[in-house]
Amino acid sequence: MLRLQEIALAEAKVPHLAGITLDFRPVQMTTLLGRTGAGKTTLLRVIAGMAMPDKGRITLDGTDWSRLPPWKRPVAMVTQQSINYPHLSVLDNVAFPLTRAGVSREAARAQAEAMLVRVGLGAMTGRHPVALSGGQQQRVAIARALVKRAPVLLMDEPFVNLDYKLREGLREELAELLRKEAGTVAIYASTDPREALQMGDAIVLMAEGRALQSGRPRQVFAAPATLAVAAVVNDPPINLLPAEVSGGQLRLVSLGNEPIPGPDLPAGRYTLGLRAEDVRTGGDLPARVVLTEVSGSETVTHLEAGSQSLVMLERAVKTHNLGSRFGLHLDLSRALIFDAQGLRLTPEPAHG
Amino acid sequence: MYRQKYIFLLPGLLVLIAVILFPLIFTIRVSFSSWDVYNPGLNNAGGAMYARMWEDSRYWEALWRLSLLAVSTVLMQYVLGFGLALLVWREIAARRFFRVLFLVPMMTTPVVMSVIWRTIFHESLGPLNPILDALGIGAQPWLSQPGFAFAAVMIVEIWQWTPFMFLLLLAGLLSLPSEPFLAARVDGAGPIRTFLSVTFPMMGAISVGAILIRAIEASKIMETVYVLTSGGPGTSTETVSYYIYIRGMRDFQIGYSAALSLTYLIIMAVALTLIAKALVRLMVRGAQA
């Protein structure tokens, strides 16, 4: 188990990591999910030894890593931009970490070749990385990381620069490879909630250098602990509706509508988090279409209802003309309720 | 219409003919004459000058000495230059100051530097021997014994031209992408292995360029020898160009020195071509294998 304790790192007095304590278990893939600048890359760099934390401890199965230089840590890493050795052939690129680990040249080349076949580059072994396309270069880098069979595998948005089909294929391939590597701690940084929900066995939500919540992906998605988590984990973004509760009645402030029977909460101000899929057409809330995005078989529509912007997700290809108006139905029974500090109050989706 | 393009090449071509082709052809013609101070002018001496050269052991010794001097000094310049460049490549304190400091020897006039070094090496008046004395090594016959005089020429050459290597290699290092170095650290390569497997191979092409430029320059070593030792003691530090200078400009044996020059040119052209090919195979392709 890879254990991080109170990892903190600041640069020029700006905290990049603020006291992160996490356990990463082998056999499961952990996804670090967060927006750009959340500290995901910095955390991976700290684990790899490329950045030294100001305080905190890193241990793998009880062995302290804090003083180890990067080249002595049993870590493999894939970064966003494909990094290879320009002067070495594809085969020697992949064999490099093995020869460093003391594997004989012949054995290293044989293993490298087998790994290149697995990532679909069996025919490219003699070429130099510059002679390959961007996607192929990244696959060389991935092969180089996987061939090492390091106990800790770090991946920093490795597929972000690849085309869609390749991304899908490599994700499955990667999951397949990792299943066979018993005892590997795999950490995968991503900005894409869908990818995180699809890939990880465990998920860690990060924002502003902190680990906000961790758990199983479905569980975190269903029950985000805070507003910030709900904002990160939902794509399309979750609708945030300011609300007031008084005397068992709930009123949506920005929509200015009539009070409705609300949850049993003390009087005060709250925020309702309503997922885009819980906003539907066919109600009596008047709204105007601001933007429509069709992706694959889904339609995401951005709307304005009074001063409140809303996002609606439909699992079908729909054409809503810009500026057109129709009535919306908000399924408030599925809304998450957060208090004034942004903590989620209702353990299960609220019934109101 | 396309023929007219050659007209535009004419000015450059004329200059080229005037400064390269004519002297070369004239030298070839002169080398087949016995033009000297007694019989000036272009007569026909056949291959007599070349026959004389074949027997002239002083010329061949000078050629051998020059080869030794060039190879050893360029090699040392490369090693030292690379070392200095690595030293100021990464973030270190006063990096800019050191970068400029290392270039000072190259920025001074070679002849002036040689005069200063002659003063330094002076056996009774120079500052070097008292220092060696104080260190318990004892005074050395720097310019009066063949081995020491040769070493003195080497020291001055290395001192003067290491900065040039340093400059080219530092430019090369600064142009390297940083990503492979990150990859090497994660792939388990420590500093020494990273240098051997990443830095050095990636510097292959620029190294060959730097070494060749210096080798071409070093094959003409003349002013250092002229000022420092005048080829002495005896002929022990005489290089080819210095010997040709003596035969041509001091003894005024124009025909003979033309034959020496031409042979020297051909030998150097062949040798440098072979060296260039060997270096490319060793340092550029070898690194990519």
Image (spheres, coloured by chain):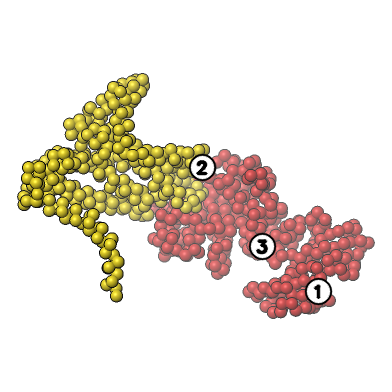
Chain colours: A red, B yellow
Estimate how packed mark 3 is, as few (under 14), some (14 to 19) or many (20 or more) residues with alpha carbons within 10 Å: many
Relative side of A28 to B68, left or right: right
What is the C-alpha distance between the residues marked 2 and 1? 61 Å
Relative side of B210 to A62, left or right: left
Kindly identify which residue carries mark 2: B91
Host chain of mark 1: A
Mark 3 or mark 1: name the one nearer the start of the chain.
3
| Element at label 3 | helix
The picture places residue A294, in percent across and down from the top left corner, at: 66, 74
The quadrant in which the C terminus of chain A is found is bottom right
Q: Is residue A8 visible to the viewer in this orientation of the structure?
A: no
Estimate how packed mark 1 is, as few (under 14), some (14 to 19) or many (20 or more) residues with alpha carbons within 10 Å: some
Of B57 and A132, nearer the camera is B57
Host chain of mark 3: A
Mark 2 vs mark 3: give the one in front: 2
Kindly identify which residue carries mark 1: A329
Host chain of mark 2: B
| Residue type at the position of mark 1 | His
What is the C-alpha distance between the residues marked 2 and 3? 39 Å
Count of labels shown? 3
Of A310 and A25, nearer the camera is A310
The picture places residue A60, in percent across and down from the top left corner, at: 59, 45
Mark 2 vs mark 1: give the one in front: 2
Q: Is residue B171 visible to the viewer in this orientation of the structure?
A: yes
